[in-house]
Image (cartoon, rainbow, N blue to C red):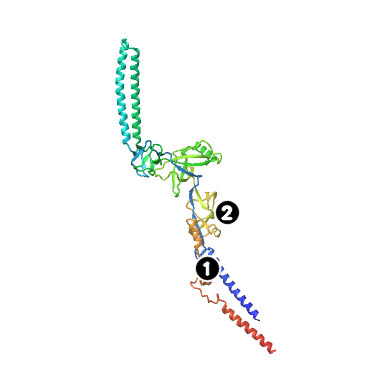
């Protein structure tokens, strides 16, 4: 008989556990399943969620990854040797063409200029003497007072003196050029980088880089397009002109720059391995947001935008007559037949049937009919809709006694509902009493 008592106890424990699991499961299901709050609308009203339409540009755009590069860049390399006397710029600043940036030791080159000037003066003096002597011998030769050999010698001396003057002038020019090279000037306008050589260092001609200048305005963006896209773009440009193309540059931080080509050219051949061709577009860069060496997204499409209405796909229904949506106006649902276009993300293009001011039902669409009265709540975006689904409670689950008990801040672990020891003890006593009764009957017999 004890075996029967133990079995009954296990059965009661399992029954109580299953009952508790069932109640908890029912409550959690109601808690996690979004439902329409009772009493949200009046008598005969259906609670729905509505959303407005979006007017967006649907013109086709192609997106590419572009590499920003400077149109002009210069490495400053000394043309003469010597010690750096002065550095006359601030690192990272903007320099104008012709600004003096470095000065190399000038004393030696100034002395060389003076030496060449003296040589030139000496050559000119020799030329004057040789010229007079040549003219004198020419007169004597005409009167047959001078021999032919004497005349030839005077003429040769005169010509050599003229050549010596030309050589001295050339040497002076070279000396002045070297002196000019001691002042290193900016050959272009742009931003200069770090000074790679500071004052007091010795530099050799054509053997060392002093600094680098890059031009940033205008600037160039290089990207590659497929052969098909290139041909389509070329045909479009021929039919509509270069100014009919609009481009947008998306910077790494997400900022969008609306810019237009100043000029554009393509490479002279298509890469046979990738079937693409390199395109080089020149842009204005007044704000210096395009930095050489950076990567950007470039979007290219028609200059004229194509506006269209977009409706959420959750608002679209279909019957035997075609597509329709339910529009809410003055809390009255109205059926509208629509003509749809392409799908863009979670929305669809509406060609006809709606206006920008319409509000369409996106949740509760199956519960309303044309002309029915509704209680509408406006949802601005999809994120707000998701939050509404997660946070909308139900009146049934909040008011249910078991839900209130499970939501209590403290749970009595000795509760008869959670602890089966009390009913099991009663059952054991009842079973024992029944066993004793049977034994008494047997003894009586």
- Tell me where residue 335 sits by quadrant: bottom right
Query: Which of the two residues, 258 or 134, is positioned nearer the viewer here?
Result: 134
Q: Position of residue 125 (x, y in %)?
A: 29, 23
Q: Secondary structure at mark 1?
A: helix
Q: Write down the residue under mark 1.
A: 397
Number of marks: 2
Q: Position of residue 363 (x, y in %)?
A: 53, 58
Q: Residue furthest bottom?
A: 444
- Tell me where residue 218 sits by quadrant: top left
Between marks 2 and 1 in the image, the one whose residue lies nearer the viewer: 1
Answer with left or right where residue 84 lies relative to residue 352. left
Instruction: Residue at 60%, 83% (x, y): give it.
Output: 429
Up-down relation of residue 257 to residue 187 (above or below) = below
Asked if the residue under mark 1 is in contact with the one under mark 2, i.e. CB atoms within 8 Å, the reply is no
Residue neighbourhood size for the residue with mark 2, other residues' Cα within 10 Å, grouped as few (<14), some (14–19), many (≥20): few
Answer with left or right where residue 193 lies relative to residue 372. left
Query: Which of the two residues, 145 or 406, is positioned nearer the viewer here?
Result: 145
Is residue 225 visible in the rendered image? The answer is: yes
Q: Residue furthest top?
A: 144
Instruction: Residue at 58%, 54% (x, y): give it.
Output: 318
Q: Residue furthest right?
A: 445
Name the quadrant of the C terminus.
bottom right
Of callouts 2 and 1, the N-terminal one: 2
Q: Secondary structure at mark 2?
A: strand
Residue neighbourhood size for the residue with mark 1, other residues' Cα within 10 Å, grouped as few (<14), some (14–19), many (≥20): some
Q: Find residue 241 and name its label.
A: none
Q: Position of residue 179 (x, y in %)?
A: 33, 34
Q: Find residue 318 and name its label.
A: 2
Name the quadrant of the N terminus.
bottom right
* Separation (CA) of disc 2 from disc 1: 34 Å
Instruction: Residue at 34%, 25% (x, y): give it.
Output: 166
Is residue 352 visible in the rendered image? The answer is: no
């Amino acid at each position: 008989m004890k075996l029967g008592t133990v079995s009954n106890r296990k059965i009661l424990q399992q029954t109580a556990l299953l009952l508790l699991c069932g109640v908890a499961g029912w409550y959690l299901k109601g808690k996690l399943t979004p439902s329409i709050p009772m009493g949200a609308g009046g008598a005969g009203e259906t609670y729905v969620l509505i959303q407005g339409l979006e007017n967006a540009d649907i013109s086709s755009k192609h997106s590419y990854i572009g590499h920003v590069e400077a149109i002009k860049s210069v490495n400053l390399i000394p043309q003469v040797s010597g010690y750096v006397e002065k550095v006359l710029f601030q690192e990272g600043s903007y320099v104008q063409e012709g600004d003096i940036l470095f000065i190399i030791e000038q004393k030696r080159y100034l002395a060389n200029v003076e030496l060449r000037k003296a040589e030139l003066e000496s050559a000119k003096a020799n030329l004057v003497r040789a010229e007079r002597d040549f003219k004198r011998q020419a007169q004597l030769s005409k009167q047959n007072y001078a021999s032919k050999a004497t005349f030839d010698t005077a003429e040769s001396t005169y010509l050599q003196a003229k050549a010596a003057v030309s050589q001295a002038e050339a040497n002076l020019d070279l000396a002045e050029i070297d002196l000019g090279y001691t002042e290193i000037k900016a050959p272009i306008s742009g931003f200069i980088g770090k000074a790679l050589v500071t004052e007091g260092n010795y530099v050799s001609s054509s053997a060392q880089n002093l600094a680098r200048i890059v031009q940033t305005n205008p600037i160039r963006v290089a990207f590659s397009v497929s052969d098909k896209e290139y041909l389509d773009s070329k045909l479009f440009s021929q039919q509509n002109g270069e100014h009919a193309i609009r481009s947008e540059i998306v910077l790494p931080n997400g900022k969008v720059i609306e810019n237009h080509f100043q000029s554009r050219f393509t490479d002279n051949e298509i890469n046979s391995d990738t079937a693409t061709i390199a395109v080089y577009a020149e842009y204005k860069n007044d704000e210096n947001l395009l930095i050489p060496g950076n990567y950007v997204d470039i979007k290219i499409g028609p200059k004229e935008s194509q506006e269209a209405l977009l409706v959420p796909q959750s608002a679209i229904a279909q019957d035997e007559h075609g597509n329709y949506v339910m529009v809410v106006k003055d809390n009255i649902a109205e059926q509208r037949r629509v003509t749809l276009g392409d799908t863009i993300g979670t929305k669809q293009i509406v060609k006809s049937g709606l206006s920008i001011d319409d509000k369409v039902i996106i949740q509760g669409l199956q519960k309303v009919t044309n002309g029915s009265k509704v209680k509408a709540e406006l949802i601005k975006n999809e994120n707000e809709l998701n939050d509404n689904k997660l946070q909308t409670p139900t009146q049934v689950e909040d008011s249910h006694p078991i839900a209130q008990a499970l939501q209590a801040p403290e749970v009595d672990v000795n509760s008869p509902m959670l602890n089966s020891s009390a009913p099991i003890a009663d059952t054991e006593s009842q079973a024992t009493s029944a066993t004793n009764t049977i034994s008494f009957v047997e003894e009586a017999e």
